[in-house]
């Protein structure tokens, strides 16, 4: 699969073609050292990152951790509270089990590509096509290499490529670290969604909305806002800055743009209740779950922590 397709969805959903190739310290060693004073005396404590919650119900405690889908090598290992929580859990729960590549590839072909004989040039206005050609030239991408992809995917390819130029890589997404650790510790791994479902959400945008989505992202690439917003959220995650995380979440979901509306109503508003119900089902078994999901799912009045609290769970924000 072309690398830019992996980058294209990295900021929005939990997928990686090389999640098991992270160059991070051995996951088990990182977990053990969190409780080993001798090791900690030599190695500085890792800083808090993201957001961590304890979820209690019927005498059982599970954990909810906010992830980012791209990152830097220096983000790992994660800090002791997170590694201990994962070590204490019997199962890791992610949006997707990113070891499964084929379902993602099939979903991408189904929802991100046009049928044979069709092309993006037939679905864009002359103005949008001119803006796209300008952005592709700046990115060093030939139109012929993306002509078979739908506008939502091309927009994400361009934004993802620019984010990677800033040093943020999908191979350093948090899910890869969590998955490596869980496998080392021989834990069960569950997924809340499927690749087919996640990518079908983008395909719910009609042609007009997809053109608008593309133009909005091209404009933000041109003025630097696309990188500024993404890097701002990643930086807030890397410092566990709850106030700034909330500000960035409002910025990404406010306004009447197609991008903000899609983020608020579909990527978060539709999925949060669905994922909360899935998490509840997992917690009703005997498993102690460590749930790692995108950071924005943990922010706001319709967040997963709030939805679980409404369902009668005790929710404690550790940080």
Image (cartoon, rainbow, N blue to C red):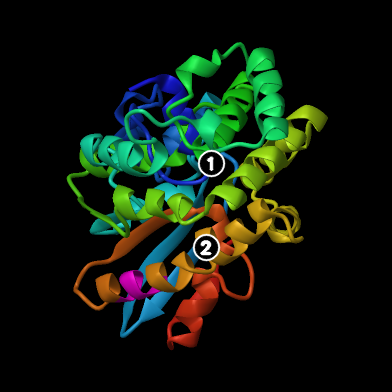
Q: Which mark is residue 170?
A: none
**Residue in view at x 52 percent, y 62 percent:** 266
At label 1, counting other C-alpha atoms closer than 10 Å, the crowd grade (few under 14, some 14-19, many 20 or more) is many
In this rendering, the label closer to the viewer, 1 or 2? 1
Say whether residue 295 is magenta: no
* Residue at the (66%, 37%) spot, across then down: 125
Position of residue 153 measured from the top left corner of the image (x, y, whole percent): 50, 37
Q: Which residue is mark 2?
A: 266
Q: CA distance from mark 1 to mark 2?
A: 14 Å
Relative to residue 226, is residue 134 depicted above or below?
above
Residue 70 or 256: which is nearer the viewer?
256
Marks 1,2: beta carbons within 8 A: no
Image position of 215 (left or right of 9)? right
SS majority, magenta:
helix
Residue located beneath label 1 in the image: 152
Structural crowding at the residue carrying mark 2, measured as other residues with C-alpha within 10 Å and reported as few (<14), some (14–19) or many (≥20): some
**Residue 311, how many percent across, how many down?**
43, 86
Q: From which residue to which does the magenta span run?
A: 276-280
Determine whether the residue tagged by mark 1 lies in a helix, strand or loop.
helix
Residue drawn at x 31%, y 85% is 58
For the residue pair 29 and 125, the one nearer the viewer reads as 125
Relative vertical location of residue 52 with respect to residue 286 in this rendering, above or below: above
Q: Is residue 223 among what the camera can see? A: yes
184 relative position to 294: left or right: left
């Amino acid at each position: 699969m072309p690398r830019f397709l992996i980058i294209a969805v990295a900021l929005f959903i939990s997928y990686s073609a090389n999640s098991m190739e992270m160059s991070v310290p051995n996951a088990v060693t990182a977990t053990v050292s969190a409780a080993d004073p001798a090791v900690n005396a030599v190695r500085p404590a890792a800083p808090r990152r993201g957001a961590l919650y304890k979820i209690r119900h019927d005498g059982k405690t599970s954990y909810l951790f906010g992830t980012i889908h791209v990152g830097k090598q220096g983000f790992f290992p994660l800090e002791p509270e997170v590694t201990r929580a994962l070590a204490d859990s019997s199962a890791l729960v992610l949006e997707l089990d990113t070891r499964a590549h084929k379902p993602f590839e099939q979903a991408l072909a189904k929802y991100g590509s046009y049928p044979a004989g069709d092309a993006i040039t037939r679905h864009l206005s002359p103005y949008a096509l001119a803006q796209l050609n300008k952005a592709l030239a700046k990115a060093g991408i030939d139109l012929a290499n993306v002509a078979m992809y739908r506008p939502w995917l091309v927009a994400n390819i361009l934004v993802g490529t620019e984010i990677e130029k800033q040093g943020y890589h999908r191979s350093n997404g948090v899910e890869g670290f969590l998955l490596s650790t869980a496998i080392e510790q021989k834990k069960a791994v569950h997924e809340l969604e499927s690749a087919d479902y996640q990518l079908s959400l983008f395909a719910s945008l009609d042609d007009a909305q997809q053109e608008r989505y593309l133009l909005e992202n091209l404009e933000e690439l041109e003025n630097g806002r696309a990188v500024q917003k993404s890097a701002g959220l990643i930086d807030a995650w890397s410092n566990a800055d709850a106030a700034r995380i909330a500000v960035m979440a409002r910025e990404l979901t406010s306004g009447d743009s197609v991008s903000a509306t899609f983020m608020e109503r579909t990527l978060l508003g539709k999925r949060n209740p669905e994922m909360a119900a899935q998490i509840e089902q997992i917690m009703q078994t005997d498993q102690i779950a460590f749930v790692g999901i995108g950071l924005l799912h943990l922010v706001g009045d319709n967040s997963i922590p709030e939805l679980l609290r409404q369902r009668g769970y005790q929710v404690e924000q550790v940080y």
